[in-house]
Each structure stands twice: as C-alpha cells, then as structure tokens.
Image (cartoon, coloured by chain):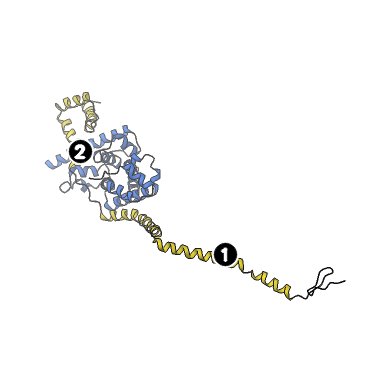
Chain colours: A yellow, B blue
Amino acid sequence: MNTCERCEEMMSAYIDGVLDDAGGAELFAHMGTCTQCRQTYAGMSAIRTYCAVAPAPEVPERLDRRIHRLHAAPAARVSRLRKVWTQRLTIPAPAFALALLVVSVTVLATVVWLRTTPAPAEEQQVMYIMSMPAVEVEGVPGRNGSHIH
Amino acid sequence: MAMAMATDAQLLDRLLRGDTRSLGEIYERYRVPLFRFCLRMVKDTALAEDAVHDTFVKLARQHSGILHPGALKSWLFRVARNEVYMILRRAAPMPLEDADGVLDPSTPHDLLEQTERASLVHAMLAALRPAYREVLMLREFEEMPYAEIAAITGSTEGAVKSRLFKARLALAGSMAGMQKERMR
C-alpha cells in the first residue's frame, strides 16, 4: 500500500472523526504535497457538505394517514370502552339508591311469598289425601272416634 | 413551562402498556429520517412509503420483541432496512450485499446526467450499490456510530468502516470524472 492509498483510508476515518492526532498530521502533511489526494479528499468530504444542506424529503400525507389509522383505530376502541365504564360509574346517587330499594323489596317479597305459599305439588298431595275414604285401623281412632275391635 | 419530551424508552414503555398513541409519537419522531432512508434506498416514493408503513405495522405488532428500550431507533432502522431489501430483491433478484463493485450497474445512465436539476452528490449517492449507500446514509444523515450501523446492517464495525471508505472513494472518483466531463 503506497502513501496515497494509506492516506485515502485515513481520509475516511478523519471525516468520521475517528483518526488519531498522529494520523491526522500525516494525512495533512501528505495532502500538502499531493494534488491528487487533495482532490480525493474534497470529493470524499462532499457528501458531508451535501447532507448538511440537503432538504429533508417531504413525507407523503398518504403515509401520515396510513400510520394514523394504524394507531388511531385501537385507541378509539379503548376510548369507547372507557366511555361506557365512566357512564356506569356516574349514575346519580338517588337513582342508584332507588334502584337498590326496588330490588331489595322485590327480593324480600319473593322470599316471604315462597315461605307462606305451599308448593303446587304439596298442595295437590294434601287435597288427594283429604279426598280418600277414611280407613280405620285397629287401635287407631277413626274419624268419628270409634275403635275397631 | 414546556413539557419535557418523552425519551424513546418512555414511549416504548407506554406502547408496551397498551397506549397506542405512543405509536403516533414515535412516528412523528422518526417519520422523516426513516422515509429519507427508505426513499434513498428504493428510489421510489410509493415503495418507500410502503417500507415505512410496514415498519410501523411491525412496531405495532412486535414491539414486545424489542429487548433494549434505548435501541428503538436502531430497531426501526433495522426493520426498515429489511423492508427495503425485500423490495429491492423483488425488483432485482440478485445478490445485493456481496456483489462486486461499489457502483450499482442498474442505475440508469441518464440519472448520472441529471446533475443540472439535482445535486451531483445526490445522483452519485443514488448510483451506489445498496450495501454502500445504506452505510453512507446512516453515517452521514443519521450520524450513527460504526457500532450502531453494524447492528442495523448485520455486519461488523470493520466492514462498515471499509464500506464507508469505498463508498466515499467511489463518490470522489465519480465526481472527479463528472467534473472532467463538464469541463470538456
């Protein structure tokens, strides 16, 4: 590798800011005497100058919309759920108390009715027994109080 | 008092907790650099748009796979680069990274002659092979260190350094040739 080739490698490192001081001194000492390397360095560093002044590309609005749809859709769903949840939590206190009272009275009335009213099957069984003819068993008083001997 | 800007790690943390609005903030932060990178790589607005879009679709679906929250930028560029290479492979089924030469032979000749309308360097940059163009883009526009470029491109720091050198040398050579042509 001749001096020019070595200096070309050093140029790239210098542009990236990773060339040490000794390398930098050698590079610039050589470029002071070599027109070819000066031109090469100018060309190699041109990209940096270009990047500094190059305008940023215009991002298409269509891409912005596509990405917006990507993150807005789930957010909207979350927001709807949150709204429903908030509505449930913000029922006015008197309405909530009234609803609770109605439910409690209904439950209580149902329990009382169930305890006092015989079940239909039980009612039928009682009626059936009452309709049967009296059978008097020995030792057991009959309906009229007589005994079988 | 101005609100402090959320860091990448904070945005990613919010995304992991299901706050999809942070996806929009991440996009706002990286839309220009990612689109610039993709556009310079694929040289087509619609294809670059697709590459950026698909990158964010992957972010929305696979963000739990980002192991280092501080490396969000590298992750985005790595995914965008993969999308770019998929597009380039579809367009030209040939080896993109191991091909010989620095200049892309598929570059139309008239692109190199459009120097009156576009910058000479812009045209030269577009004429580089993708493997060289990407390291130059990441280094010069995004000012990434060698290690980060190596992580994004799946190569070593030495390879990045070497490609940067060759890319710059090719640019310098092309520019010198152009200038000679112009002076005739």
Q: Quadrant of the C terminus of chain A?
A: bottom right
Quarter of the image for the N terminus of chain A: give it. Answer: top left
Q: Which mark is residue A48?
A: 2
> Residue A33 is drawn in which quadrant?
top left
Q: Is residue A61 left or right of residue A114?
A: left
Vertical position of residue A104 compared to residue B15: above or below:
below
x, y percentage for residue A93?
40, 60
| Foreground of the two, B177 or A88 | A88
Q: CA distance from mark 1 to mark 2?
A: 87 Å
Q: How many marks?
A: 2
The chain containing the residue under callout 2 comes to A
Q: Few, some or many C-alpha atoms within 10 Å of disc 1 (few <14, some 14-19, many ≥20)? A: few
Which amino acid type corresponds to the residue marked 2 in the rendered image?
Arg
Mark 1 or 2, which is nearer the eye? 1
Q: Is residue B149 above or below residue A34?
A: below
In the rendered image, is residue A49 in sight?
Answer: yes
Q: Amino acid at mark 1?
A: Val
Snapshot quadrant of residue B133 = top left
Helix or strand or loop: what does disc 2 sit on? helix
Q: Position of residue B145 (x, y in %)?
A: 28, 35
Q: Position of residue B21 (x, y in %)?
A: 33, 51
Residue assigned mark 1: A111
Label 1 marks a residue whose chain is: A
Q: What residue is drawn where x is 40% and y is 43%?
A: B65
Relative to B184, B22 lies left or right: right
Counting residues from the N terminus, which is met first, the one under dot 1 or under dot 2?
2
- Give the percent coordinates (x, y) of residue A119: 64, 69
Q: Please indicate whether residue A33 sits to the left or right of residue A143 in the image.
A: left
